Amino acid sequence: MASVWGDWGVGSEIGRLRSVLLRRPGPELDAVTDFDAMQMRSELYANLVRSQHDGLADAFRSHNVDVHYVERGRDDKPNAMFVRDLMLMTPEGAIITRPASTVRAGEEPQIAEALGRLGVPILMSVHGAGTFEGADVIWVDESLCFLAEGLRTNEDGANQVERMLREIGVKDVVRVGLPHGAMHLDGLLAILDRDLAAVWPRRTPYKVVETLRRRGFRFVEVDDETEAQEWLPMNFVALAPGEILMPAGSQQMQAAYEAAGVRCHTIEIGECIKAGGGVHCMTGFLKRESV
């Protein structure tokens, strides 16, 4: 595939990160007058969001990660900075998602255009009555992933994605349901290392924990729910096994990660969090090395 399309592919959450896709917030953020209607946490300063987003891109580059951008946007789509929701990278190419939120519907063509420009194979686009967002899949390795149904991914969309994943050879696609009120699976489960995951007691689906436990995983659990909700410490990006880039401000969870042997790099994205997402939400993964 690499000789025709390019060297792309993701089959884990922790393989050495080599390439990402970002959307730097453009004029669409200046156009927001009702932040609540745009499903954002609070009012925010657009220029500060851009500055922090630039800091995220610089942090990736400092770790030898290639940064690519979605160049075109729409003035009525200020949430397009959260690229993770709009695509799912697989070992064989990308799946274009279909957001359930009417606020976000219509962001997909810009993602497809960016992927096409880069030469990333597009395996499918979720269609028909299906809805699916990329943050509802968590890769463990190329043979196992979790696929959640819930607020943003319905049964039809999950069925379409599962069929494609099995078609490209993913042996175990473990279907789970999300608790009422949970946005995405990546808010309840995050992989830190080859045998280490972050989970949220009473929220992370039981089937997830039991599946990982049978594989010998250890767990870091959310202790302070207020801290977890305010600073999004589970919304990190693994740069390599046991090494993560996470939002600054979550001292307890960072300490727990480090006590478990994880190397933590922090970045200030507090203004971006006001828009409703963290480091993981803003990152579209294009290339990871195999683990």
Image (tube, helix red, strand yellow):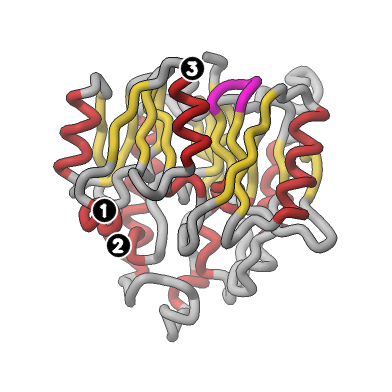
Q: Which residue is mark 2?
A: 271
* For the residues bearing labels 1 and 3, Cβ distance under 8 angstroms: no
Pick whichever, 82 or 75, lies toward us.
82
State which tag comes first along the sequence, 2 or 3. Answer: 3
Alpha carbons under labels 1 and 3: distance apart = 30 Å
Q: Quadrant of residue 76?
A: bottom right
Q: Give the quadrant of the N terminus.
A: top right
Q: Which residue is mark 1?
A: 231
Q: Quadrant of residue 64?
A: top left
Q: Position of residue 281 (x, y in %)?
A: 46, 50
Circle 2 packing at 10 Å, graded few (<14), some (14-19), many (20+), is: many
The image's mark for residue 215 is 3
The relative height of residue 141 versus residue 119 in the rendered view (above or below) is above
Residue 142 is inside the magenta segment? yes
Q: Locate residue 140 relative to residue 155 in the image: left or right.
A: left
Let me know if residue 110 appears in the view.
no
Q: Position of residue 9 (x, y in %)?
A: 65, 27
The relative height of residue 21 versus residue 152 in the rendered view (above or below) is above
Pick whichever, 168 or 200, lies toward us.
200
Residue 23 is inside the magenta segment? no
For image coordinates 27% across by 43% down, the residue present is: 222
Which span is picked out in magenta?
A: 140-144
Per the image, label 3 sits on a secondary structure element best described as: loop
State which tag comes first along the sequence, 1 or 3. Answer: 3
